[in-house]
Image (cartoon, rainbow, N blue to C red):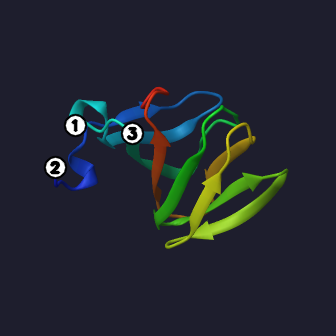
Amino acid sequence: MKIMHYTEAEPKHFDTDTAKGVTGRVVIGKDDGANNFCMRFFELSTGGFTPMHTHEWEHEIIIHAGNGEILCKGEWVPVTRGYTVFIPGNEEHQIRNAGDEPLVFACVIPAGPPEL
């Protein structure tokens, strides 16, 4: 068993043309013996965004804090604390911070794809 606060996991920062102000952390993954899923926490700073992308695997998201928007079928959909999101495989998506505080969310993916 592993119990920890997400901020204790090692952060990895992304700041490029396609991903701005993103910090990702693997909180439960293969190093913990998780053979089926990987849970990550992401923080998007003010003005931050993930890359617009697609991939084969589905993933599930829960917004932990902040205000954001998720690109869904070409439309930006607002999300805030408590919202859940299911993104099927091969669906184009992007997440951006739409507020003045960090947008924090947990994301679960199947084992196999890169954890971060």
The circle on residue 12 is none
Name the element at disc 2.
loop
Which of the marked residues, 3 or 2, is nearer the chain's N terminus?
Answer: 2
- The residue depicted at 33 percent of the width and 35 percent of the height is 35
- Residue 99 rendering spot, x and y as whole percentages: 58, 64
Residue 51 lies left or right of residue 110; in this view the side is: right
Residue receiving disc 3 = 36
Label 2: how many Cα within 10 Å (few below 14, some 14–19, many 20+): few
Is residue 49 in view?
yes
Q: Is residue 103 left or right of residue 39?
A: right
Q: Are marks 2 and 1 in contact (CB under 8 Å)?
A: yes
Label 2, label 1: how many angstroms apart (C-alpha)?
A: 8 Å
Question: The residue under label 3 is which amino acid type?
Answer: Asn
Of labels 1 and 3, the one closer to you: 3
Residue 5, how many percent across, how many down?
22, 56
Q: Is residue 97 visible?
A: no
| Label 1 SS | helix
Position above or below: 89 against 67 = above
In the displayed structure, would residue 87 be above or below residue 52? Answer: below
The x, y position of residue 50, in whole percent, is 60, 41
> Label 2 is placed on what type of residue?
Lys
How many other residues sit within 10 Å of disc 3, few (<14), some (14-19) or many (≥20)? few
Looking at the image, which is closer to me, 92 or 34? 34
Query: In whole angstroms, how far apart are the C-alphas of marks 3 and 2?
Result: 16 Å
Q: Is residue 3 left or right of residue 105?
A: left
Residue at mark 2: 2
**Front position in the image: 27 or 81:** 27
Quadrant housing residue 84: bottom right
Task: Residue at 65% x, 32% y: name it.
Answer: 56
Describe the element under mark 3 as helix, strand or loop. loop
How many neighbours does mark 1 have within 10 angstroms: few (below 14), some (14-19), or many (20 or more)?
A: few
